[in-house]
Amino acid sequence: MERRYRLQKNKAFQYVYRRGKHAACRNLVMLCAKSKTMQVGFSVSKKVGNAVTRNLVKRRLRECFRPYLGDVKNGLYVVVARPSAAKATFKQLEKDVNYLLRKQEALKEGNRAE
């Protein structure tokens, strides 16, 4: 994912946690806060597994979100992985990301992916 789309600073994450609206499913939670730019951050806690597992989940989530970069409305997004995400397949994570984007109404008009 390109640097301009990454949410990196702790203050930005804290802002989204405080101000963002959340939507959840079995494996993921997505928080969304208004902003002039579109940036995404991924949070995977130690409850998910060891470092190898956490990095695998983060790589999968980045790849699941990448096709939507042009279709997502401006805002700050944080995707939080639940412990069950470690056992989820890539296809399940793709479905969850799509579901959460639709639930948050984050997709631009005319780009409603099914």
Image: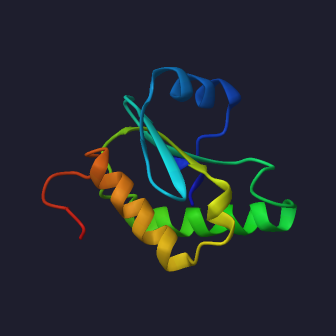
Question: In this rendering, would 4 be left or right of 94?
Answer: right
Q: Is residue 69 above or below residue 15?
A: below
Question: Image point 43% across, 63% down: which residue?
Answer: 96
Answer with the quarter of the image where residue 51 lies: bottom right
Q: Position of residue 114 (x, y in %)?
A: 23, 70
Question: In this rendering, would 10 be left or right of 50?
Answer: left
Q: Nearer the viewer, residue 49 or 60?
A: 49
Question: Image point 20% across, 62% down: which residue?
Answer: 112
Question: Image point 69% across, 66% down: which residue?
Answer: 86
Q: How many marks do you count on the picture? A: 0
Q: Is residue 38 above or below residue 63?
A: above
Q: How is the image coloured?
A: rainbow
Q: Is residue 10 above or below residue 97?
A: above
Q: Position of residue 40 (x, y in %)?
A: 52, 46
Q: Position of residue 52 (x, y in %)?
A: 84, 67
Question: In this rendering, would 6 be left or right of 64?
Answer: right
Answer with the quarter of the image where residue 53 lies: bottom right
Q: Is residue 36 above or below residue 27?
A: above
Name the image quarter holding the N terminus.
Answer: bottom right
Question: Image point 81% across, 49% down: which residue?
Answer: 46
Q: Nearer the viewer, residue 34 or 38?
A: 34
